[in-house]
Amino acid sequence: MSQYYYTDGKERFGPYTLEDLRGKNLTSETLIWKEGLTDWVPAKTVSDLNSLFEPAETFLPLTSAPYAPPLPATAPKNWLVESILVTILCCLPFGIVGIIHATKVEALWNTGQRDAAYTASKEAAKWVKIGLISWAICVGLYLLFIVFGVIAGFGSM
Amino acid sequence: MKIKTIIWIAGGVILIVIYGLLDPAAGHFPKCPFRMLTGLLCPGCGSQRAIHQLLHGHLAASFQYNQLFLPAITYAAMGGIISTLAPTKWPDVRKSFYGTFAAYTALVIILAFAILRNIF
């Protein structure tokens, strides 16, 4: 939770939490400072304080279905191409796990299981990353062996 | 351009230069860990040698090291081009060729390839 200060031009007040500020009758022009800002700025420019200045009625859903979240039009990324590349290029079967998850993403999405689709997308991405990272580790270990081999070779000369 | 993109491109260029100049068939390259552990060929075995041959324009030799490498890299390149240059264009193409059906097809092909290359 951020701590906010405000000033009336003479004195500094604070620190306050966002909830504290609600009772202070601040205007959108009140100068505000919080950690991360270099100078005092009008409250209207601090985005996390916007709710202080919104007319109360905007909080009350008036008409239509307010509970339907806005839906993105397309399914999340299925990571199929990346999974195939990891399978073919990284020489480790983690990519196959990625492909298995890739098969689920759009199928789940099309049957309305949107959260599950996002989870499958994340899982596929995770296995692609695991494949890449383990490939990098193998290459790193291999290079280490070479470096030590060269040093040992020089030592025995 | 984002820093991340630049790093990926730079990394790709470095790898292309390394795999172009050195031939993995002569050694000097990390061996497949899966192969070392199990003695079996994984679907990616031979890809390093296949990359080297491809970079030298030897398509037939590339195909011999890993039969799935050329088709997979072509398919991936097409997918990359479509989703980078035209992310919202041709949604039907993307859906047909890079969707659920494609994922199952790829899975079957890769698993069949993994099994068959260890038998023959």
Image: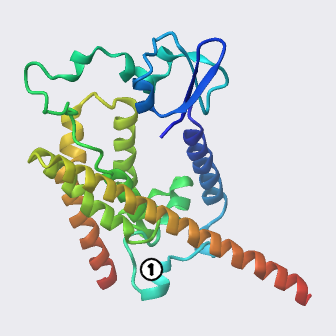
Q: Mark 1 is on which residue type?
A: Phe
Q: Say whether residue A42 is left or right of residue B64.
A: right
Q: Position of residue B2 (x, y in %)?
A: 56, 34
At x 68%, y 72%, the residue is: A143
Colour convention: rainbow
Q: Say whether residue B33 is left or right of residue B119.
A: right
Instruction: Using the image, determine if residue A10 lies above or below residue A80.
Output: above
Instruction: Using the image, determine if residue B9 lies above or below residue B48.
Output: above
Can residue A133 be seen? Answer: yes
Is A100 or A108 nearer to us in this picture?
A: A108
At x 18%, y 43%, the residue is: B96
User: In the rendered view of the protein, which quadrant contains the C terminus of chain A?
Assistant: bottom right
Q: Say whether residue A126 is left or right of residue B112.
A: right
Q: Position of residue B41 (x, y in %)?
A: 40, 79
Q: Residue B5 is drawn in which quadrant?
A: top right
Q: Residue B86 is drawn in which quadrant?
A: top left
Q: Position of residue A56 (x, y in %)?
A: 26, 17
Can residue B28 be seen? Answer: no
Is A65 or A41 nearer to us in this picture?
A: A41
At x 36%, y 64%, the residue is: A95
Q: Position of residue A116 (x, y in %)?
A: 20, 54
Q: Residue furthest right?
A: A157
Instruction: Using the image, determine if residue A134 lies above or below residue A29.
Output: below
At x 38%, y 53%, the residue is: A82
Instruction: Using the image, determine if residue A43 lies above or below residue A67.
Output: above
Q: How many marks?
A: 1
Is B46 or B95 nearer to us in this picture?
A: B95
Q: Which chain is disc 1 placed on?
A: B
For mark 1, does the 10 Å Cα neighbourhood hold few (<14), some (14 to 19), or many (20 or more) residues? some
Dot 1 lies on which element? helix
Residue to which mark 1 is pinned: B34
